[in-house]
Image (spheres, rainbow, N blue to C red):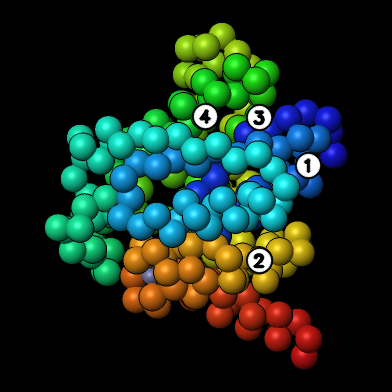
Amino acid sequence: MNSEKALVLFSGGQDSTTCLFWAKKYFGKVFTVGFDYGQRHCSEIQAARNIAEKANVPFQILKIDLLSQITVNALTSNRIEMENEKPDKRPPNTLVEGRNMLFLTYAAIIAKTQGIRNLVTGVGQADYSGYPDCRNDFILSLNKTLNLSMDFDYTIHTPLMWKNKAEIWQIAAELGIFDLVSNETVTCYNGIKGTGCGNCPACYLRNRGLEQFLENKLNLKK
Ligand code: ZN
């Protein structure tokens, strides 16, 4: 562990919770920031608050509801039916355009004011969701842009970039937070804590990953 500080972009979901505890293992002092961008369900933010408290880290929430005014998507609008199947030729309608770029940019501004060079985010492209701003190329590019724009030497850490959901469950188990992730996080697009609604694309990925992880564990024991 080094003595440096890190700021984790934290939503209270499986991935960012795993990142939070990963950061606690590798950094001296960890901070979290969450975003209220008019998502349909406030259970996410409530979950984030609870988990941050359990992890004993400061949690700050930024309201950026402008995002839901200028984009049309199924995560912030009740009028749009969520697509359960991933479309072939375009990202799913749960994509919030520009979301990760904005989140990381705001997080970077906060981080600099507190002398924090390390940003941690749970984005990844292994179980590629069709969201362009989860890809490694984008993160590398934004890292460079943030360094130039604020004349500061940021490092964006993406410990889950190449991990599929089964491997992310494995990391949670190794960090000793399997139960916490199972019971306290909200990944579900319908805002249901823990195992979720079981029907939305986020639940599908999470639960399929969990089955694979449990299967791998069984096979190891044999
Ligand atoms: Zn769900």
Dot placed on the residue nearer the N-terminal end, 2 or 4 = 4
Identify the element where label 4 is drawn.
helix
In 3D space, how far apart are the residues under numbered discs 1 and 3 (Cα atoms)?
Answer: 11 Å
In 3D space, how far apart are the residues under numbered discs 2 and 4 (Cα atoms)?
Answer: 25 Å
Using the image, tell me which numbered label, if any, was put on residue 26. Answer: 1
- Nearer the viewer's eye, disc 1 or disc 2? 2
Q: Is residue 3 above or below residue 187?
A: above
What's under tag 4, amino acid-wise? Ala
Asked whether mark 2 lies closer than 8 Å to ligand 1, one says no
Kindly identify the residue that appears in the image at 62 percent across and 75 percent down.
213
Horizontal relation, residue 138 to residue 154: left or right:
left
In 3D space, how far apart are the residues under numbered discs 1 and 2 (Cα atoms)?
Answer: 19 Å
**Crowd around label 4: few <14 · some 14–19 · many ≥20 (10 Å):** many
Horizontal relation, residue 108 to residue 169: left or right:
left
Write down the residue under mark 3: 118
Q: Is residue 169 above or below residue 119?
A: below
Q: Residue furthest top?
A: 151
- Nearer the viewer's eye, disc 3 or disc 2? 2
Q: Which quadrant holds the C terminus? A: bottom right
Write down the residue under mark 4: 107
Write down the residue under mark 2: 180
Residue 90: tell me if it is visible.
no
What's under tag 1, amino acid-wise? Tyr
